[in-house]
Image: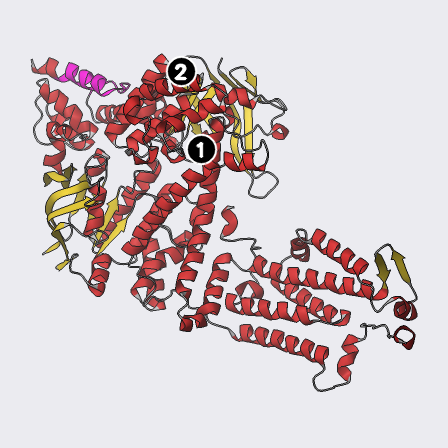
Amino acid sequence: MQIEIRSLSYIYNPKTPFGKLALDDISLDVEEGDFFGIIGHTGSGKSTLVSHINALTRVQLKYNKNAVLKVCGIDLCAKKPDVKTLREKVGMVFQYPEYQLFADTVRQDVGFGPKNLGLGEAETEERVRAAVARVGLDYDEIAERSPFELSGGQKRRVAIAGVIAMRPEVLILDEPTAGLDPEGKKELLALFKRLQREACPTVVMVSHNMDEVAECCNKVAVMNEGKIAGVFSPRELFTRRELIKGMGMEMPSVTELAYYLAEGGVPVDPSCLTESELVDGLLNIYSGGDK
Amino acid sequence: MKDVVFGQIYPVDSPVHRADPRAKLLIMIIYIVTVVFVPSFMLYGIIALTLLAVILMSRVPPLKVLSGLKAIIVLAIVTFIFTVLLNDGAGKEAELATFGFFVEFGPFCICGSGLLAGGRIMCRIVLLILGPTLITLTTTPVDMADAVEWLLAPLKLFRVPVHAFGMIMSIALRMIPTLFEEAGRMMNAQKARGACFDHGNIFKRAGALIPVLIPLFVSAFKRAGDLADAMESRCYNGGKGKTRMKVLRFSVWDVLAMLFFAALLFFVLVCTYNWWGWGWTDIFKLDMIEPVVGRSVLG
Amino acid sequence: MNIISVKNAVYVYNSGLEDEVMALRGVSFDVEQGEFISLIGSNGSGKSTLARLLNGLYLPDEGEVIVNGKSTLTAKHKDMFDIRRTVGVVFQNPDNQMVASIIEDDVAFGPENLGLPSAEIKERVEWALDRVGMSEYRKGTPFRLSGGQKQRIAIAGVLALMPRVMILDESTAMLDPRGRKEVMDTVRRIREKEGMTVIMITHFPDEAALADRVIALSEGRVVIDADAHRALSDVETLRQYGLDAPLCTRVAYELRKRGVELDGNIITDRELREKLCRSK
């Protein structure tokens, strides 16, 4: 088990009248090999939850007497958890990660993490080279350039390289495709899928975009108002349409289109997830009849 | 930090909350000058009673106003102690003659005049803090910024860009929480990459902040550019010909309040300097016991 | 009469320098009063630059942009004022376009700059906030609002200028689905009630499908300019420029390619459903 969470709660502004339960008795398991999606509205608690995983938000021990939070074998409910090792094992790509670039050259920026881990020059250099290549950029061309003069998409890749250069066991992605155009989104999602296969077997992706979660993840936790409304496989989602719509969230758009067609009398299976599944389903009905 | 807009405001409705922020600003200035000129405990008492009346009128719990002293209490006590210890009044004999005691130890001493001086300084500090605290508890920074801009308006005659100052204040109030939040996000992002902000000596710590400060500046400049575009698109051209939605108007009560505080200042000044030699003003200085510098000292 | 007319506009960043970039390479089109246009194009195609040309924030290096009969190139002070109150722009980042910390003060910013009397500003602010459904928040601060609500305030800030054209420069790009829907519903309502001309820059194909006319930019040139049905149903041409058609259009395209007969251009789910039901 890479991440184990049992009855974790978190209160914003405790002891004031503005106190708000941001996490309400959360339990979750993320296993090695999972591409785990967490979906919910802005303010549903998903960001608070993942910042616990990286100890950027500490467990409020006072309100969490019986809680369990274990990440890569490190007990975060301990009085003094081993945060340094934890951050080595858990990499986190924040929303709009390109805004955190700071160094003079791409090489230095990507090397910031490995340096903080105390690695030597040679090891750092090797990791930087590998990480830049992994995100699909040409190291020799880009290494000595300033990160600020790159294009938006390149900047984001450099920032992601900065995280994977630390070779984390668990990679957390917070709205990784926000603000990109459809083409850029597609490329980045493909990159994450490849990363998971080749480099970092456990990925947790926080998103408000049901399509990308349904496309990449094998499990999807639906969050609403600080609670987990359920953990489903993408294919199960269509059976929970009422629940998801009821929380004001979108269904995967292919599922939703199929449902809409079925509702109007087109006899197609509404559980399809990808465009080609939907097309095949429709072809079975229509070309069969035509020919 | 999100509260920079409402600042410390205590959200109730009261005549003090509703008062024109310009009146409050002017009264605050008059009040500060008054407190600085007060010579005696009796007059401090009168001012304290006035302040108490305003606090009651504002419906802010008095304890809430007193908590404004928390930040300053140590400084006030230290000031009191030093004033007492370093003040030898009119000298040992005169002090002994007037107050009947004079304690010496090393370079320090405790004497009647010293204690009185210390007490006055304490009163002054406490009153200087409480007044403005009440203002911040009843006025939003946004309103205060408007008032400051109004107060500075005469400087336009000397080509001081008062409007620009006002705009800067307004935008600063608007952007500070956003940038503060962003700084937090950047720190978290770099922490996640193993950065450490709480180790080592001060230089190391300052150095550790570079990966936060550089992106913060980059982003602040981008925001500034965006904001300039947005302002220009909404017909901003440096405030020429600009009107205001909220036209501030002094009410009768604002004027009366200002007159009252101006009268209080005048009264304190008359008591202090006794320009016209009125005897009755001395009543308010009764507690100003001055040791008589006797012949024994001089002679 | 055309409210906006762009004639062969060229715009170059860092002109004459080493890192000179030609963002627009001769763009021409006209906008009529009351049209609903979506402007699409991949990142770096010049869409946002074009938005800034349309209200005189940037001036074209070649060609011209004419708003309400006045060229932005030659507009002096007062004319530029007229251009900016004719064409209002809502930008991408909701946090970077609010000037004041109290919502009603922010909405009042535009009319205050116009030098209107206080009573009229109040009226406009009330009206604008009502149009975007944010009246109850008028005394509050923007900080506690969601992205969608902030963007509605930004729209109100533009509405208060009473423009004839509203440009939305990727105003939904940073929002979550709920925020996007909020903003799109608001825009639609305003269009219906006020008959305003809307130019919406977006890279979401389903948003583009709401418009009547679609203009696509690629590498600084207009590559498609047609009514929305024709433009968005041409999957192949869109792909050629790195653009996507709406999901239902792509499905219809695949079906047709494999021999299913579906007539007409399909760009909404409803159209797809109707056509499929009919051909059963």
Same-subunit check for callouts 2 and 1: yes
Q: Is B29 drawn above or below residue A49 in the view shown?
A: below
The answer to whether the residues at label 2 and label 1 have Cβ atoms under 8 Å apart is: no
Let me know if residue A270 is in the magenta part.
yes
Q: Is residue A45 visible?
A: no
For the point 24% across and 61% down, the residue is C81
Q: Is B97 drawn above or below residue C137 in the view shown?
A: below
x%, y% of residue A32?
Answer: 44, 12
Q: Is B250 drawn above or below residue C178 in the view shown?
A: below
What secondary structure do most residues of the magenta stretch adopt? helix
Q: Amino acid at mark 1?
A: Ser
Q: Is residue B214 left or right of residue C262?
A: right
Q: Which residue is mark 2?
A: A200
Range shown magenta: A267-286
Q: Amino acid at mark 2?
A: Cys
x%, y% of residue C239?
Answer: 15, 28
Q: Is B45 drawn above or below residue C2 in the view shown?
A: below
Q: Which residue is mark 1?
A: A44
The kind of secondary structure element at disc 1 is: loop
x%, y% of residue B53?
Answer: 67, 67
Q: How many marks?
A: 2
For the point 35% across and 59% down, the residue is C109
For the point 34% across and 32% down, the residue is A147
x%, y% of residue B193?
Answer: 46, 26
Nearest-to-viewer mark from 2 and 1:
2
Q: Is residue B107 left or right of residue C125?
A: right
Q: In which image quadrant can residue A41 be found?
A: top left
The first of marks 2 and 1 along the sequence is 1
- Chain letter of mark 1 equals A
- Chain letter of mark 2 equals A
Tell me if mark 2 has few (under 14), some (14-19) or many (20+) residues whose alpha carbon lies within 10 angstroms of its own: many
